[in-house]
Image: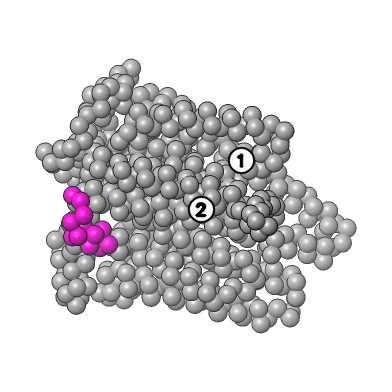
Amino acid sequence: MTTGIDAPARPIIRTNGVAIEVDTDLVAGTAILATALVIGLATAGHYGMTIDEFNTDDYGPKALAWYTSGFTDRSHFETVEFSLWYYGPWFQMLTAFVQSLGLADAVTVRHAMTFLTGIAGLATLLPIARFSVGRRAGPSALILCLITGYLYGGLFFSPIDVPFLTAMGLATLAIVLMARRVVPTWSATICAGLATGLAIGTRTGGIITHAYLVGAMALCGLEALALNGRAARSQLRAITIRTAAVIAIGWVIAVALWPWLQIGNPLDQFRIAYLHFANISQQFGFAHWGDEVQTDDLPWSYIPGQWLARLPVGFLGLLALALLFAFRRTFRLLRTSLALLTNQGVFGLRRPVLLLARSRCILLVWAAAFAPVGFLVIQHATLYDGVRHTLFVIPMLALLAGWAFARLLRSISRARIAIAMLAAVYLAAVVIDLARLHPLEYVAMNAFAGGTSGACGRFELDYIGEPRPPKPCAGSNTASTAPKRRHQTHRAFSSAFLSESNWQDRCCGGIGDWPSTQNRQIS
């Protein structure tokens, strides 16, 4: 099956007369991941503790006790922060188990576990790119993710959002593998069931993977119909059976991983959790591009506006280029379809329909990048802390940006060396900036927002911290107007890093001496 993306030829190396095929993109991607892994594990102890980590450190052992006690210990329903049981605890249980081994202090172990899980999620970009937008987009997407300070910093201390990112990456990859064939293989079907179940069993938003699945399988069915007409009945039946199998396996896995679904009718329990987050009662104001907005009355442009401020400028430029390429392709397809319809009637649409159906893996990546955000806009969802609740979307955006970069290099091959040199200089500048911010990469803002210093007071930079800085930022006329947050205890965690009490002085008033990161005591 073709995807509309020309895969570059792999170089052949001959050793003693033996031809060895080298996948340079896989080698490059592996090297990038390995470098990030070494740096991340070496610096995991530099980060302080977020309020979510404090709460999930309590949730994990108690959720684990539910299983080890034979489903009799209900402490994780009764003695943890309200609503934690509305999240699947598999990652918190895994972290609690590793913490119990005493390999390092509990906070460092948690950060290392969260980072390892996040890196595993980013690693899915390599095979997703290979089977959808083109293998060369994979390494570029990895780099774009790792130079996005908001994402890279969050990989250490977002104990709910990072596991969800990984689960969604695995689910998207599994559905892409299913969609490679008109009738998916049973091995791909089982993998998709396991991965979608993991996504649902992590957070209620994982249910959107069923939409990805149904959409991809519908396009498989469309190809079968376009090729075989009425003779495609057996193929359509097989596609339907496999789709149902994925959904069934997914729910079995979700129930097995999520105790909340085990104490009643799983569908009713899921609905309760889903409605809780859909109608979450968090009402307070915070800064967004210098204006005060309310969590429950956000403008439709809130998420794109946050991307415009938090994603690196190069990332945004490539993403805009990807949209331009996509609009161009869509226009050409519509123009060709209209011409064929005019000249040949309905039968002339067979070729465009086949092209659309065979592009399903690429379309799945586009859906994974924009469908969740569109749903949140339509739902008028309550959001805060920037866009960390949609952290899982950033890798899919990076894939599209990587696809645009690969196409750009092919389009202007004569300037390939110059583009590569400019990209290297830009990457070096971004990495140096993140190194200066370390371990505060999470608050990095791009030039459109005025940089991190210029964004202070105009954006909510902290992780469940004060909506406004506790004092006016250097170079800012915005005074502190911190309204009451959802829990007074969150004020003890006014920074994403407990030990970084002067982070606003560093980032808003200029990067000064690096403070000590040893003290993790809650004051």
Tell me what residue is drawn at x 28 percent, y 22 percent. 512
Work out whether residue 58 or residue 353 is closer to the camera in this orientation and state it.
Answer: 58
Q: Quadrant of the C terminus?
A: top left
Give the number of the disc on residue 200: none
Q: Would residue 521 be visible to someone looking at this image?
A: yes
Q: Amino acid at mark 2?
A: Leu
Tell me what residue is drawn at x 46 percent, y 53 percent. 123
Work out whether residue 332 or residue 40 is closer to the camera in this orientation and state it.
Answer: 40
Work out whether residue 300 or residue 82 is closer to the camera in this orientation and state it.
Answer: 82
Density class for disc 2 (Cα within 10 Å; few <14, some 14-19, many ≥20) is: many
Tell me what residue is drawn at x 28 percent, y 48 percent. 111
Residue labelled with disc 2: 125
Question: Residue 320: where, in percent of width, then height?
Answer: 59, 38
Asked whether, in this view, residue 151 is left or right of residue 46, the answer is right
Residue 95 among those drawn in magenta: yes
Question: Residue 27: where, in percent of width, then height?
Answer: 53, 50
**Quadrant housing residue 481:** top left
Q: Which residues are magenta?
A: 93-105
Residue 209 among those drawn in magenta: no
Q: Amino acid at mark 1?
A: Phe
Instruction: Classify mark 1: helix, strand or loop.
Output: helix
Q: Is residue 491 above or below residue 120?
A: above
Asked whether, in this view, residue 100 is left or right of residue 377, the answer is left
Looking at the rendered structure, the number of numbered marks drawn on it comes to 2
Q: Which residue is farthest right?
A: 343
Tell me what residue is drawn at x 65 percent, y 32 percent. 417
Q: Would residue 86 be visible to someone looking at this image?
A: no
Q: Quadrant of the N terminus?
A: bottom right
Work out whether residue 458 or residue 149 is closer to the camera in this orientation and state it.
Answer: 149
Asked whether, in this view, residue 114 is left or right of residue 166, the answer is left
Question: Residue 186: where, in percent of width, then height?
Answer: 54, 77
Give the number of the disc on residue 405: 1
